[in-house]
Every structure is written in C-alpha cells, then in structure tokens.
Amino acid sequence: MHLYVCRDYDTISKKAAGLVGGMVSVKPNCILGLATGSSPIGMYERLAEMYRDGITDFSKVTTFNLDEYCALSEENDQSYHYFMREHLFRHINVPDENIHIPSGCTQDMEMECQQYDAAIAAAGGIDIQVLGIGSNGHIGFNEPADAFIGPTHLVNLKESTIKANARFFQSEADVPRRAISMGIGSIMAAKKILLIAHGANKAKAITATLEGPITPEVPASILQLHPDVVMMIDQEAAAGLSEYQPEGR
Ligand code: GLP
C-alpha cells in the first residue's frame, strides 16, 4: 500500500489526476473504475483540463462506475448518472457507448447486478479503480456488515450514510434508502486501486482501514489484502495514523 499524505485537497486532486491520466497515456484503451461523492470532484476537474489541453485522450477508454441510487431517474440531479455527466463525461471525449453506470431503475435488479459484473469481466477487468470512503468506512455503497459481499448487489443504506448524503438532497427524507453497488469482490478484482480522502471526518475510517483488523464492519479494511493500492489523503484525514507525524514531513 502506498500512502501519500498531501498538503491539501488541491494537491490530492492533481496527484490523483496524474495517476489516472498517466494510466490513460500508457494504455489508451484502459478500463477505468470511477467513483462519485465530493472526493473525486477536483480530480475530475483536472482530468477535464488535461483533455482540454490536449494532454489526455479518452477516446478509447471504457468506464465502469461503482454505484447508483435505486429509483432515481438518470435525469435526476442527485443521481450518479447526472453527477458523472456534469463533473466528467461532458467535459472529455469518452464515447457514450463506453460508459457504464449500474441502473437503479431496472425492473430485474438481480439481472442488472449479474450483467454489470459480466460486462466488467468481458471488458477485461478494471485497470484502476478510484474510490472515496464513507465516514463509516464504506467503499462504493458496501456498508458495514457481518460479511463481505463479493458481487455487484442491492444495498440497504445505513442510517449514517443517509445522514451523510442528505447534504446533497433537499431533505433527509429525499435520500433513497436503497442503492446498487459493485461488491467487494468486484472492487478487489481491479488491478490497481486509488483511494482519495480528505477532511477530519474521514480520519477514523482511514485509521481503521490502514491499522485496524480486516473486518466487514469496516469494508475498506479489505484493501489491506490488495496488492496494489495507492491512498492519497490530506493531513486531517491522516491525523489518527500512529505512524503519521506532521512535523516530520
Ligand atoms: C457515497 C458514495 C461513495 C463515496 C462516499 C464518500 O456514499 N457512494 O462512493 O466514496 O459517498 O463521499 P464523499 O467523497 O462526498 O465524502
């Protein structure tokens, strides 16, 4: 696991965009696993800039997003379809037919889950998966639970996640209670993982992820078993790490 404790959010965003953009440069037809949430927004801005400046060409890239709320239409401005369009896809040249986001509105959700994992496998697997982290340690929408769930699946969101995500909705009551998410197995199958986190409210989850036991109660702790994880976090998110001494850096 490579841990970078960065000066601030802007530094994380630049460094993260460098890694993802670098992957696209060395493998133009790479498969990117993408995330939503506020954490990757700065990275997406940088990637859009790299496209505008002619540095990065996304024309052969394929993308798979981690998750989507159930029962929000793709046009709803709180859906992850909308988020990705606004923050990344409309600013770069990734072809529409190469973009994959699970549907939270399909009749047969079981089939949707199976087909999503099958599509990732058929594409050759994810080269780099971008992750944020919930303050309860969730990745994608894999919530703290009694067991790790491998494949893409339906999730009942935890109260803590509904509360945390309520800031994006008019009221807490508007936050969907269910979501579809790539599972821990789908995420761990990625060849490389980039986790981004900033802010004091992530410190507990980051410490548990890096230094705690591997447990489904902290879904991100499974990343300790992945052979190629890069974490880019700020000093506030690093504050609880036993090895981290800001004065020394
Ligand atoms: C949501 C998403 C996660 C994301 C998390 C953290 O619940 N499903 O993929 O990592 O929020 O979001 P933020 O980056 O806004 O803190």
Image: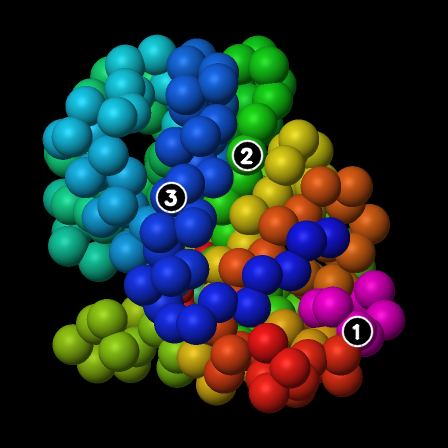
Near mark 2 (Cα within 10 A), the count class, few <14, some 14-19 or many ≥20, is many
Rendered-image quarter of ligand 1: bottom left
N-terminal-most mark, 3 or 1: 3
Q: Which residue is mark 2?
A: 128
- Tag 1: amino acid: Glu
Residue 104 point in image, percent of width and height: 37, 44
Dot 3 lies on which element? Answer: helix
- Dividing the picture into quadrants, the one containing residue 105 is top left
- Residue 199 placed where, x, y %? 44, 79
Residue pictured at 15% horizontal, 54% vertical: 77
Amino acid, disc 2: Ile
Is disc 3's CB within 8 Å of ligand 1? no
Return the residue nearer the eye: 47 or 62.
47
* Left or right placement of residue 134 versus residue 169 in this view: right
Is residue 74 among what the camera can see?
Answer: no
The foreground one among 162 and 88 is 88
Residue at the farthest right position: 213
Neighbours of disc 1 within 10 Å: few (<14), some (14-19), many (20+): some
Is residue 130 magenta-colored? no
- Residue 190 in the image: state x and y as whole percent: 64, 33
Helix, strand or loop at label 2? It is strand
Residue 176 lies, with reference to residue 119, above or below; the image says: below
Q: Amino acid at mark 3?
A: Ala
Q: Say which mark, if any, is on residue 211.
A: 1
Residue in front for this viewpoint, 57 or 204 = 57
Q: For marks 3 and 1, give the CA distance.
A: 26 Å
